Amino acid sequence: MPCIRSAKSPRNSNLLAIIAFAVSLGAICCSFDPVPAGDDIRVARVNQSSTRIEHASDVPYPPGYHSNPSDSLKSVPTAVTSQDSSNSAVRNNGDAIKFSMLLLKDGGRFIENVHSYRVLFDKRERISGDIGDTQTLELKVRHAPAFSVYMKWKNGDKGRQLLYNEAYEDKQMVVKLGGLKGRILPALKLDPFGSEAHAEARYPVTEAGLAGMIRQIVIQRELDLNLAQGVVCTRLENQVFDERECYCFRYDYSSTDASALYRKSFVYMDTRYHLPLKVTNYTWSSNGEGLTPEQLDEMTLIEDYSFRELDMGTPLAERDFSRENPSYRM
């Protein structure tokens, strides 16, 4: 009797393969959110208690940071729920400072590769011992081909304008006063590093914008790393600022030997680009006895900066940084 071998029909095999492919494709599609490439995902305003990060491993490491997986909890101090860091558990303080500094450097690399951007800049500074009111400025910044900055005041001396463009040979900044004075008086050319400029701002216009802010903070963090003791870096709960979720770091200094200028500092960095969107610094006081912590902070506030409504998608033209722009009347 002839031997008959059972065999699967080719049609059945093809049908099974098609079914398996369809199941796999469905699983893949369900694993990803339908976000178009290049879209800026806006972070919804959320309750602060829901943004707490319990473990350091929840934060994406920036380039250049290497952590021992078995020591991940030591890379960033445990988040605290109180503004008093004296009761918080801080581990491996030098590692925490280094981690926050590497985040900033990563943000610096990112923003320096952005050709130009617009942003609202809030600043409140203590100059010659006196704390001023909060000023809000419309800020335009260009990094290439020549670093350029345009500022227009939204309050205070409303309408005041400042333009600095490294492409001009005189290397001067041009200031047009606001209000009636600006209509009567001509624009002024000032040395960015001169006494007139220093009387109005703690930092020169050459450091304006996010890249300059990052440079100044990194300088301080490098000084912190060189300290054997006297500075404590604490990772706080995440906060939402300007509809962007932010990592928050607090730095406390034990004495003027650790930092001659700063008593404590807060830095909020957005979790996507690692840009410092809010920076608040407090200095020392010799007569703070009997004051509440809030009163002491108000007395010793020295620098308060924030960047809001950051727009990196609208291209800026050469005329935005030109003294000949007729709308500037410079």
Image (cartoon, rainbow, N blue to C red):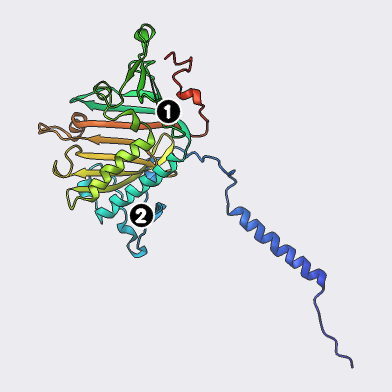
Residue pointed to by mark 2? 56
Q: Position of residue 42 (x, y in %)?
A: 49, 38
Q: Amino acid at mark 1?
A: Ala
Q: Secondary structure at mark 2?
A: helix
Seen at 34% across and 36% down, the residue is 213
Q: Is residue 16 above or below residue 194?
A: below
The quadrant where residue 204 appears = top left
Seen at 35% across and 22% down, the residue is 173
Q: Residues within 10 Å of mark 1 (few under 14, many from 20)?
A: few
Seen at 46% across and 32% down, the residue is 117
Residue 77 seen by the camera? no
Question: Closer to the camera: disc 1 or disc 2?
Answer: 1
Q: CA distance from mark 1 to mark 2?
A: 44 Å
Residue pointed to by mark 1? 167
Q: Is residue 177 left or right of residue 110?
A: left
Q: Position of residue 58 (x, y in %)?
A: 40, 53
Q: Is residue 25 above or below residue 310?
A: below
Q: Are marks 1 and 2 in contact (CB under 8 Å)?
A: no
Q: Secondary structure at mark 1?
A: loop
Q: Amino acid at mark 2?
A: Ala
Q: Position of residue 299 (x, y in %)?
A: 18, 29
